[in-house]
Image (cartoon, rainbow, N blue to C red):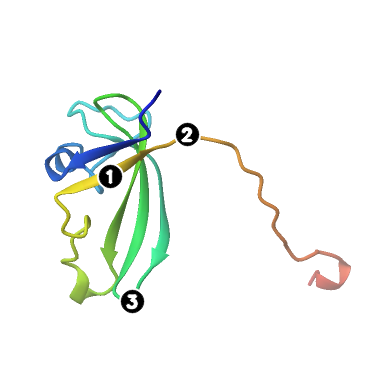
Amino acid sequence: MTETKRTLTREQLEEWGLPYELVGAGDQNPFGVAVELHREQVDTRRWYSVHRLVFQAPDDGQPWAVDYRRGLTEIQEDTDEWDDADEVTATLMERYEKTIAAWRAVSGPESEG
């Protein structure tokens, strides 16, 4: 059975370049840092926003996700990304396709200049 969680130390996170110094998929990776696969904001609090980062770990090549924080004002710029934790739990991820329905205005003769 595949483990779906793993614990990463702050030293591992820093060594792999998380959360800001990753390389893109297809980029050269001479330093063995993590590869960024996806990043999105998942929550907003009063003083910081929460972001989810999906990355390919350099040690096992698997896609993992971690959440980190970013301060919302210059006063919170020193917000610790990992909420002052010594260890961070990463979740094993898998890619899937998703169809989204959206709405747009109809263009017609009356809307043309």
The amino acid type of the residue labelled 1 equals Thr
Residue at 17% over, 29% down:
31
SS category of the residue bearing label 3? loop
Q: Position of residue 89 (x, y in %)?
A: 28, 44
The amino acid type of the residue labelled 2 equals Glu
Q: Which residue is mark 3?
A: 46
SS category of the residue bearing label 1? strand
Marking on residue 89:
1
| The C terminus: image quadrant | bottom right
Q: Nearer the viewer, residue 93 or 112?
A: 93
Residue at 17% over, 54% down:
85
SS category of the residue bearing label 2? loop
Pick whichever of labels 3 and 2 is earlier in the sequence: 3
The answer to whether 75 appears left or right of 53 in the picture is left
Pick whichever of labels 3 and 1 is earlier in the sequence: 3
The answer to whether 105 appears left or right of 23 in the picture is right
Q: Which residue is mark 2?
A: 94
The amino acid type of the residue labelled 3 equals Arg
Residue at 29% over, 24% down:
60
Comparing marks 3 and 1, which lies closer to the viewer?
1
